[in-house]
Image (cartoon, rainbow, N blue to C red):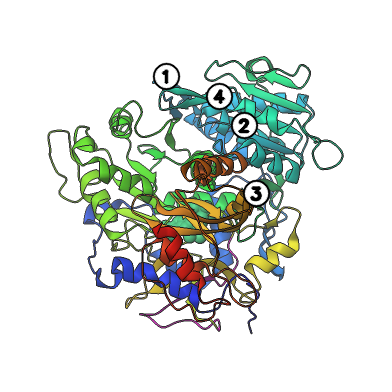
């Protein structure tokens, strides 16, 4: 049984849209395959046996992982309670402390001197934290937050750059059972305000600012602005703001509310006993864009999340914690920075690199110098970065010795075969700065997952799977993924459809903060008993999965998720704009780019470039610089159906410079001609 409840789209046209990737990149012609080298396979930490074991009994497989990878202060009595779908409970009755598992136990097990974090600041300053030192910092932060009145279940908003204090803050919250809500530093004061209000945060942790391409970039001023209003009726809920001094820039100060990190955390006691929290105790909220104008607060809980992030981190990256140096380039403001920077690597006792800045500061070889300096062996990054490096040229990474690299990860958007091959050959094949080549380049693991899934879901296992350029290929052990047609029937090999998840998984979202109905409606109503991911996908002749892009009104810009509706509502909040429609148009570097079509109000003057610039800045102010449209086109009309729905498909054709497709369902069939005419002017 299934119902269609996604009012935003015409059934059929959406998969067709996603399948464009297929046509566009000619994926069907892609049949290269790269088997693991025998040495790699022989030393791999996870083998094919895990698939069979998980298939035999999924909950039992995950229960085994939970007990092996985590230390529980109270054992659980049941692996999975799925008696009230779609609300899952994993590891029922168990108690576990995330921070204890990430830190204290490694110190207790004799690994206190192992490096947890090598921090590299953008200006070139460095800091190293061993597990013992990081444990101490987190204990101090936990004491400091408690002394500021933060208790179990309270929400803490985090607006920080990529500095160790970000990880320390997250783990300190987890330690005391406070729920963190990280807001990416690239989001605006307005976006921060709405997230603080929705979660009713009690504390905000921020920094004076950070560095961006050698220049200071402010953060605290946005917090001040976000807190300068009355909040949701009764005044906002924030009582205190803790401020890390990072770039030393001037800040406004609110006595009584604002506290320097050094004065609070720095002076707190380094003794703090961790207690176990219920396996289903909320760990964090992370806001992400959906198909409507308001971001959703995705809720994750403790035991299942930690288990699946730790298992996948070990299995997919073939982690050998004693010898590997792992570097995930994602910002902690996104789910990748939560699961694969703040939690999994530390749970697994790994040594990781953390870098504050951009890849081109002070020059385009910065990342490769970092790889050489710390002998990074596992690198996890996004296709948009890889395509940028391709553009800059292979001579740049060739100047560094990348021979330490043995596994390469990709995440965030589909990786085109060309970028995949470049990543493998240029980064994975480098065996020294004198142009030496590795006999077998490092394997690439393309990992498909989402903010909602919490952890990786589809990815090759580097010691098992023969990898294919451009495909994430196989569901991980214990994960039940399928591709289905409109009717919810599994499609045969060689066909495309919608990506679904058939069985509950440990790190699955437990809901949308404060909105259980939206949780059901968004993910569990299209196909009643299956999770609807919002992605189109195809099974090839071997049954391997190729991700084709979103089938809803969510865009993916440089691996960052943005909704068309959110940007449209930012645009129409400008006094000059009467109506707006936004589409994601294919872009060579960023995957997709935001293209906006706007109708100006009757009394607004079309000032050409000036109004376009003003509207771009307005979107930047409402949402953040990442949401600024690449292109804004002022048009006289928008194409709508008879029921008033904007036909984005046609606008996408215009934005991508294609001949406009079937427009027969338009209410006014002259509209597309009017738009074309106005754009020629
Ligand atoms: C959406 C989720 C997962 C962390 C970063 C993004 C797209 C993600 C892949 C991949 C093809 C991918 C999907 C997904 N996506 N990884 N390996 N291949 N598409 O998390 O912001 O929640 O976005 O990113 O469209 O639905 P997110």
Tag 2 near tag 1, CB within 8 Å: no
Q: Is residue 319 left or right of residue 134?
A: left
Q: Mark 4: is the Cβ under 8 angstroms from ligand 1?
A: no
Residue where numbered disc 2 is placed: 169
Q: From what the image shows, is residue 181 above or below residue 258? A: below
Count neighbours of disc 3 (C-alpha within 10 A) and say few if under 14, some if 14 to 19, many if 20 or more.
many
Q: For the residues marked 4 and 2, what is the alpha-carbon distance in whole angstroms? A: 16 Å
Q: Which-is-in-front pick, marks 2 and 3?
A: 2
How packed is label 1: few (under 14 Cα within 10 Å), some, or many (20 or more)?
Answer: few
Picture quarter with the C terminus: bottom left
Within 10 Å of disc 4 (Cα), the crowding (few <14, some 14-19, many 20+) is many
Q: Position of residue 623 (x, y in %)?
A: 60, 43
Would the CB of label 3 be found within 8 Å of ligand 1?
no
Q: Which residue is mark 3?
A: 302
Q: Earlier in the sequence, mark 1 or mark 4?
A: 1
Image x and y of residue 194, in percent: 70, 43
Label 3, secondary structure: give it: loop
Residue 440 seen in the figure? yes
Q: Earlier in the sequence, mark 2 or mark 3?
A: 2
Q: The residue tagged with tag 4: helix, strand or loop?
A: strand
Sequence-first tag of 3 and 1? 1
């Amino acid at each position: 049984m299934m119902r269609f409840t996604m009012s935003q789209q015409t059934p059929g046209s959406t998969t067709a849209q996603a399948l464009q990737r297929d046509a566009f990149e000619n994926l069907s012609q892609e049949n290269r395959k790269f088997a693991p080298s025998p040495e790699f396979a022989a030393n791999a930490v996870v083998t094919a046996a895990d698939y069979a074991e998980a298939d035999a009994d999924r909950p039992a497989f995950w229960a085994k992982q939970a007990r092996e990878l985590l230390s529980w202060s109270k054992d659980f009595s049941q692996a999975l309670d799925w008696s009230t779908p779609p609300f899952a409970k994993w590891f029922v009755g168990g108690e576990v402390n995330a921070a204890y598992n990430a830190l204290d136990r490694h110190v207790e097990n004799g690994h206190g001197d192992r490096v947890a974090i090598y921090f590299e600041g953008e200006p070139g300053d460095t800091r190293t934290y061993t597990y013992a030192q990081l444990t101490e910092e987190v204990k101090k932060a936990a004491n400091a937050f408690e002394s500021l009145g933060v208790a179990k279940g309270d929400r803490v908003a985090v607006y920080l750059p990529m500095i160790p204090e970000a990880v320390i803050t997250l783990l300190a919250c987890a330690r005391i059972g406070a729920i963190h809500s990280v807001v990416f530093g690239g989001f605006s004061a307005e976006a921060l305000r709405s997230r603080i209000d929705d979660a009713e945060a009690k504390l905000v942790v921020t920094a004076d600012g950070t560095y961006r391409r050698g220049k200071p970039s402010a953060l605290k001023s946005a917090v001040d602005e976000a807190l300068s209003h009355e909040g949701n009726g009764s005044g906002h809920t924030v009582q205190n703001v803790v401020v890390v001094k990072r770039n030393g820039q001037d800040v406004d100060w609110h006595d009584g509310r604002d506290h320097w990190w050094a004065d609070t955390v720095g002076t707190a006691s380094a003794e703090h006993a961790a207690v176990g929290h219920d396996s289903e105790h909320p760990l964090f909220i992370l806001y992400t864009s959906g198909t409507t104008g308001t971001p959703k607060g995705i809720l994750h809980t403790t035991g299942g999340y930690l288990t699946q992030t730790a298992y996948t981190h070990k299995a997919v990256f073939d982690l050998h914690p004693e010898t590997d140096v792992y570097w995930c380039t994602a910002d902690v403001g996104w789910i990748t920075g939560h699961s694969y920077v703040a939690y999994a690597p530390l749970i697994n006792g790994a040594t990781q690199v953390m870098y504050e800045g951009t890849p081109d500061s002070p020059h385009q070889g910065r990342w490769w110098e970092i790889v050489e300096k710390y002998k990074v062996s596992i690198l996890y990054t996004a296709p948009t970065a890889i395509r940028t490096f391709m553009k800059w040229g292979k001579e740049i990474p060739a100047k560094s010795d990348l021979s330490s690299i043995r596994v390469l990860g990709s995440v965030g958007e589909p990786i085109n075969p060309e970028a995949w091959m470049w990543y493998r050959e240029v980064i994975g094949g480098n065996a020294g700065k004198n142009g030496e080549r590795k006999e077998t380049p490092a394997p690439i693991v393309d990992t498909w997952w989402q903010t909602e899934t919490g952890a990786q879901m589809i990815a090759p296992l580097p010691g098992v799977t023969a990898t294919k350029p451009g495909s994430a290929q196989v569901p991980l052990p214990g994960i039940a993924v399928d591709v289905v047609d409109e009717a919810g029937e599994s499609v045969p090999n060689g066909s495309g459809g919608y990506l679904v998840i058939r069985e509950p998984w440990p790190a699955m979202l437990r809901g949308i903060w404060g909105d259980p109905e939206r949780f059901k409606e968004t993910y569990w109503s299209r196909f009643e008993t299956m999770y609807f991911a919002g992605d189109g996908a195809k099974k090839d002749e071997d049954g391997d999965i190729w991700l084709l892009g979103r089938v809803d009104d969510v865009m993916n810009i440089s691996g960052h998720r943005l909704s068309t509706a959110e940007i449209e509502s930012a645009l129409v909040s400008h006094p000059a704009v009467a109506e707006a429609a936004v589409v994601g148009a294919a872009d060579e570097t960023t995957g997709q780019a935001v293209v906006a079509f706007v109708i100006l109000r009757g009394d607004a003057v079309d000032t050409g470039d000036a109004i376009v610039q003003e509207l771009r800045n307005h979107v930047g102010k409402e949402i953040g610089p990442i949401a600024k449209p690449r292109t804004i086109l002022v048009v006289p009309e928008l194409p709508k159906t008879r029921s008033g729905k904007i036909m984005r498909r046609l606008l996408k054709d215009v934005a991508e410079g294609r001949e406009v497709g079937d427009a027969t369902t338009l209410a006014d069939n002259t509209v597309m001609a009017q738009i074309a005419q106005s754009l020629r002017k």
